[in-house]
Amino acid sequence: MSTRDEKAHKQASATDAEDIDEFGYKPSLVRSLGSFHTFAAGISYISILTGTFQLFYLGLGTGGPSYWWSWPIVFLGQLMVALCFCELAARFPVAGSIYNWSKRLSNHGVSWLAGWTMLTASIVSIAAVALALQATLPEIWSGFQFIPMQGDEDTNAQALNGVILAALLIVFTTVINAFGTKLMAQINSAGVFIELIAAVVLIILLAVNIVRGPQVVLSSGGIDASGRPLGYAGAFLVAMFASLYVMYGFDTASSLAEESHDPRRNAPKAILRALFFSFLLGGLILLFAIMSAPDLSDPAFGSLGGLQNLILAVLGGGVGTVILIAVVVAVVVCALAVHAAAIRLAFAMSRDNNLPAGTKLCTISPRFGTPVVSSVTIGVIAIVLLLVTFSPQIYTVVTSIAIIMIYTAYLLVTVPMLIQRLRGTWQPRPDGFSLGRWGLPVNILAVIWGALMAINLAWPRNEIYNATEPFHWYLQYGGILLPGIILGAGFAYYWTVQRHKTGVVAEHARVDTTVATPTDKPVQEA
């Protein structure tokens, strides 16, 4: 390293330490991640191959070919949120981004609620992503169906087998995340590289097999929406779930800020790159899949199947199987990234002693340099959740609720940020990413978008929350009831118990702890 480079590295390290010091923390995590590592974390959380393959059936089966338009619509809405997050990532490059950002934008109650909302949703997402293996592995080799099936539509055998495969994957992500950030990042980056190459190859292969023109996305495909409120628009809002379920998690790049080099510059770039690449590649895969399907009315591609069946039908067993293997890789690294993001959030909250047993959850292993207790705890909870949501009907409800809560957590950041903008108190980093005069309109659009989509996701629709017998009213209204219970019970616990224990734990408190705010006061370890 030259003298100039060494001097620049020392200056960046000093600035990194100042960023942590502002929150009352001393550096505890090892900075070992480069710009591609942070980009890979964001794009693997979004994981275009995981999301598009997992939910294509819902979009096509509910909205027909024109459901494709939900992809650019969701991209534009999430871009508004991502741009706000870029300013925050440059201003506050710390672990547990959602939690710590809202702490600086609002008060400790709002920040705890944002962190709690995102943490619970992330743990559910780990289980949901891991269950995606069931849709792909048995298609590659029937031996992955460990539980014998009594017919092709034996949903109980499929669900139980999915739980087994998912539990094995969560054990893997737990071990890798516990053994070190660098190992996790290397596996994640390799997986992302494979996923991106596979996505490009899949786009080319689908493009050379198209049997209809792009005008097909202007057709509803004969979807009967006569009995729906708002007609086809109501069906389209349901089909939009398939895109809403994919394009989130780009903030993961900033969650790794305390383990990244120069996060003030790298994190905003990683957020935008992850979102743009996901939009471009995912949009082309969906478009060419619709254009190349032998028969779009075939239920094997819609209500009774999905993109896996379509790929095998278009490309044949040999090439199609290779693509499905890449999808499995994408699912694995997606689960790895979601688990990593959840760990950083749990670490950030427990470092402020804002979770039960916080002093244990935030302990950094001297051998591995990671919060091993947090990694194992989150993995165990995710596996327990798999067992609780064994029923396919309950699983659909719980995973839908996880997405509602993530969009709610984003609102708990964008709304306080908008309030600060209106008050004139928000100041982006002078030498970092800034929206300038576009900040206010972008922030307003981000809030409007987030609120509308949270309402859309929570709307009590039978096909999402109560699709099969036995029908229960509490399942139909699960998108409203369960988030309300989780948020209400969680905040009640925080307000009556945990907030009285809040304070930076001694292990992570900076040497100078003179700032008299609740989260800056060090507390003794239990």
Image (cartoon, rainbow, N blue to C red):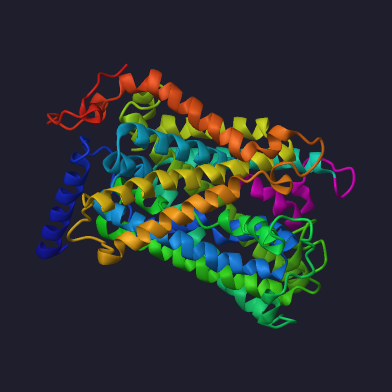
Q: Which residues are magenta?
A: 128-153
Left or right: 74, with 436 as reference point: right
Does residue 118 lie above or below 318 as drawn? above
Left or right: 20, with 294 as reference point: left
Q: Residue at x 65, y 45 (%)?
A: 131
Q: Nearer the viewer, residue 247 or 367?
A: 247
Rendered location of residue 158, percent (x, y) = 77, 43
Q: Residue at x 77, y 49 (%)?
A: 143
Rendered location of residue 489, percent (x, y) = 50, 25
Give yes or no for residue 137 being in the magenta stretch: yes
Left or right: 57, with 299 as reference point: left
**Does the rendering let one see residue 363?**
no
Does residue 440 lie above or below 200 as drawn? above
Q: Nearer the viewer, residue 29 or 102?
A: 102
Rendered location of residue 349, percent (x, y) = 36, 33
Outermost residue toward the front in this view? 230
Give yes or no for residue 524 being in the magenta stretch: no
**Does the rendering let one see residue 71?**
yes
Rendered location of residue 116, percent (x, y) = 44, 34
Q: Nearer the viewer, residue 415 or 282?
A: 415
